[in-house]
Image: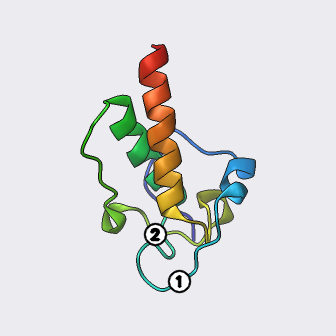
């Protein structure tokens, strides 16, 4: 089942598949990488110095398009980096 939350930005399939596989119980398993990426991007584009990934707020997903079995922590980090880059270049 795909995530039901809206995503302002979407990672493409190549980027999603480049994230490390993560299937350990808890701490991000079956959570949406698109949600994690968007959370990181938002925080990065605001240059927040105290950042946080709230895993429980991420949508649940079993869909490949949402990064099934991939690391939400890496997706968040990538989003933060892209958000900082967007801030700097704007």
Disc 1 marks which residue?
24
Q: How is the image coloured?
A: rainbow
Task: Judge whether residue 20 can be spotted in this image.
Answer: yes
Q: Secondary structure at mark 1?
A: loop
Q: Is residue 52 above or below residue 88?
A: below
How crowded is the residue under tag 2: few (<14 C-alpha within 10 Å), some, or many (20+)? Answer: many
- Can you tell which of label 1 and label 2 is closer to the viewer? 1
Circle number at residue 76: none
Q: Is residue 1 above or below residue 9?
A: below
Question: Residue drawn at (31%, 61%), measured in percent from left and top?
Answer: 54
x then y, percent, for residue 40: 41, 45
x then y, percent, for residue 44: 38, 36
Q: Are marks 1 and 2 in contact (CB under 8 Å)?
A: no
x then y, percent, for residue 77: 47, 49
x then y, percent, for residue 85: 49, 26
Disc 2 marks which residue?
60
Q: Nearer the viewer, residue 87 or 62?
A: 87
Q: Residue furthest bottom?
A: 25
Q: Residue furthest right?
A: 14
């Amino acid at each position: 089942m795909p995530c039901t939350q809206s995503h302002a930005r979407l990672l493409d399939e190549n980027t999603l598949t480049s994230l490390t596989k993560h299937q350990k119980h808890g701490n991000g398993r079956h959570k949406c990488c698109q949600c994690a990426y968007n959370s990181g991007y938002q925080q990065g584009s605001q240059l927040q110095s105290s950042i946080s990934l709230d895993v429980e707020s991420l949508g649940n997903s079993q869909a490949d398009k949402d990064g099934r079995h991939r690391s939400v922590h890496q997706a968040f980090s990538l989003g933060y980096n892209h958000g900082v880059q967007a801030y700097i270049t704007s």
